[in-house]
Amino acid sequence: MSKQLRTAAGSGAAAIAISLVWAASALAHPVLMPTLTKEIAQQRAARAINPPPPPCPQYPSESCTPLPETPATTLPFPGNMAYYGGPVEVTPKEYVVYWGWGQSGAWPNGTNCAAESISEGSFSATLPCDPDVAGKYVADFVQQMGGTAWAGVQTQYFQTNSSGAQQHIANPSEQLAGIWVDDSDANKLPSTSMNNAAGPTNTLTALATEAQAAVAHFGITDLNNSNIVIVQPPGLSDPNALSQGYCAFHDLTYPGVESGAYNGIQQGIAYSNIPYQLAINSGGSNVCGENAVNSDARGKLDGFSIVTGHEIEETVTDPGAEDVVGSSPTHLGGWYDTLDGNENGDKCAWVGENLLTATGPPEPIPGALGNITGNAGDRFAVQSLWSNAANEGTGYCAGAGTDSPIPSSPS
């Protein structure tokens, strides 16, 4: 989803802070996978919580089309993305943080907990509890996504430096830059809300504080190319996601935006909020990708790679999460749709998903969800990503092994 909830759902209503910095935010839209019975309600909810794309209506002197942003379902949203002048992550680095996995309340009573060792290249860690092996699966995915054709979709996008030169996003084979199992900083997300004032009980402030702790833990100095992926256990996951049914979001810490939720937090930290995907249910059914592609035992974890990949790729191409700041204005966002602010993940979210069952296999249509083979040979479910180059430059969803048969335009 584009950045994150601005108000209380996932993308959030635009929060305009008028001070030295005032912003129209589009908090990366939360990822939703509606079933047919929930489609109408969720689309109405999305219209209520997603702001028009910047600069509408905050800057009426600039032309725009004030359409709401909603994630794609079944079919992609057409129309190529535009460059808004903000940065991209040219050499992306992903730092995975398991927040509170050994803390009291992290797991339901009676969970059979056993320690899980994670070893990814030069990085290793031990999860105190990982009953579904979801934590290891996420680390494996982030370690193996680099260098794949799926991640290669990002290389067509670029930022413009001060000299006007285009700097394209790379696709290094090693994009995992660190793993941290953090049980020292208490995860108090269940006692927070998106509706609370900025501070410890505001969900955005709490997530940003943990992201800031991760920056210090890892000693990160290159914030421009770094993303903090905050993965939560079921009992300590973002309560707004659990109650509202969105799967994740990403955002950028910046003073003055999000109703001041990031005031006092180090500026410029990109982070992805990844609740425990199997805990997000509606009517007894998981709504965040369980068995969305695969029907075997591994398919239970499909949602973790689909959703984590969605947020990582949106952060790489739009770390500014569509924010607009200052009276000039200045666009912090990189690439997204000109009509409704959808980022490269939103435009292709859940394409091919069966809305009657919300489980796989996806419909056999171009751009549908699919499996990729990681750089170490493991299989991961992913959604496709918007490619401006696809369909001879008219654009389409690509990278999941379900590309359009129409060739891409040369880069």
Image (tube, rainbow, N blue to C red):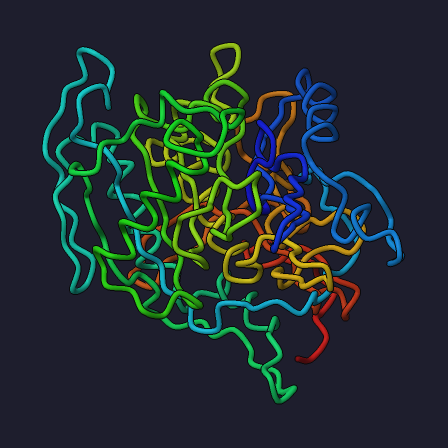
Residue 1 placement (x, y as % from top left): 57, 43
Residue at 61% across, 54% down:
21
Residue closer to the observer: 314 or 76? 314
Q: Is residue 71 above or below residue 19?
A: above
Which corner quadrant of the image does residue 119 belong to?
bottom left
Q: Is residue 375 above or below residue 111?
A: below
Residue closer to the observer: 129 or 95? 95
Residue at 57% across, 27% down:
8
- Horizontal side, residue 258 vs residue 374: left or right: right
Residue 60 placement (x, y as % from top left): 87, 51
- Horizontal side, residue 194 vs residue 201: left or right: right
Residue 213 placement (x, y as % from top left): 27, 49
Residue at 48% across, 73% down:
90
Residue 307 placement (x, y as % from top left): 47, 41
Residue lying farthest front? 19
Residue at 26% across, 38% down:
99
In the picture, the quarter occupied by the C terminus is bottom right
Q: Is residue 292 above or below residue 88?
A: above
